[in-house]
Image (cartoon, grey):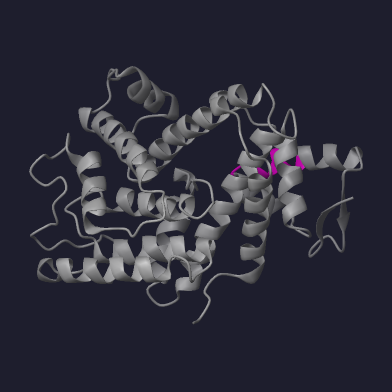
Amino acid sequence: MKQYISAKLLQTAEKLRDRIIALRPFPNETLKSLKEYYRIGLTYSSNALEGNSLTESETKVVIEDGLTIEGKPLRDVYEAVGHAKAYDYIHTLAINKPLEESDILELHRLFYEKIDTENAGHYRTIPVFISGSKYAVSSPSKIGTDMKKFLKWFNDNEHNLPTPEFAALAHQKFVFIHPFIDGNGRVARLILNLALIRNEYTIALIPAVLRHEYVYSLELSHENPSVFVDFIADRIIATQTDLLRLLTDGGANGGANTSTKIKNGGVNLEELIFETIKNNPGINAPTIAKILQKSLRTTQRYLKSLSDSQRIEFRGAFKNGGYHTT
């Protein structure tokens, strides 16, 4: 079977996964904080990719306090509440059991029921077209059959493919069917993360700032799945790197501060850059800035600090060299 994921990206993702696993078992408070951290983070980022106007702080208030936000569309509030419910549901599916059609329908129902009760949890009965794409999605008459094929593929390949590749392909195959009238992207990203957490990985976030790369790589994957698979693998690596920083910044096993750090979402950018270089020897400043979604100037400032403290060094010529840990 052809492997679509880059060997280097797979190796990095697996190494990070193993480092996180080695930190277990986590205290109950840390586990609870992690789940809430990603509940907010995934809800905010996934909705933002689709144009939802809520900020991350507003998303937190809507989900945790049940409040509406003055001046924000009610639909945006419903999307946040619904996505949080669907996120909770994927954790009930993170066990060694086949994925079923009823699971997918329930994911969509939970997300969409406050927006459109009639269509929530039901396949669409009308044709739809994806703006900006030259490829057709499944016709209404074929959705039932295509979804059964998708579920068979999912259950047959979950333990036969590298998890980052499997998760990316599950997202791709689902969204190419586009079975619902709306919410397909959100459900696709929930399925992607379901595949990850069922196989010892953590949640992967795709920030709205990467929307162009995300949509572009998905479109290209009609012809070359490797493009999208590697994009998702990169996001898995970036999210795991951030989690490791949260878990280890203050103690090898998190310590008493870990749950507070996770709740507050504090970022030690210097350590994050150091981890990125450690996991990607030879990486250059523009690539680090892109992975971490920081400005090049900010990234270079922290690189200088790390270089001055002799934790990293630049090797090679200016144009094609890169940073290494010492």
The residue at the far front in this view is 96
Residue 135 in the image, given as x and y percentages of width and height: 27, 72
Along the line of sight, the residue nearer the viewer: 285 or 14: 14
Q: Is residue 299 magenta?
A: yes
* Rendered position, 5 above or below 203: below
Q: Please give left or right for residue 112 compared with residue 190 in the image.
A: left
Q: Please give left or right for residue 90 compared with residue 305 in the image.
A: left
Q: Is residue 191 magenta?
A: no
Residue at 61 percent of width and 64 percent of height = 10
Magenta span: predominant SS is helix
Residue at 31 percent of width and 50 percent of height = 187
The residue at the far bottom in this view is 1
Residue at 70 percent of width and 38 percent of height = 298
* Rendered position, 264 above or below 78: above
Number of callouts: 0
Q: Please give left or right for residue 98 compared with residue 323 in the image.
A: left
Q: Please give left or right for residue 87 compared with residue 262 in the image.
A: left
Quadrant of the image occupied by residue 170:
bottom left
Please state the extent of the stretch shown in magenta in the rendering.
293-300
Residue 219 in the image, given as x and y percentages of width and height: 38, 67
Residue 207 in the image, given as x and y percentages of width and height: 48, 44
Along the line of sight, the residue nearer the viewer: 259 or 261: 259
Is residue 133 visible in this depiction of the protein? no
Is residue 326 visible in this depiction of the protein? yes
Along the line of sight, the residue nearer the viewer: 251 or 214: 251
Quadrant of the image occupied by residue 110:
top left
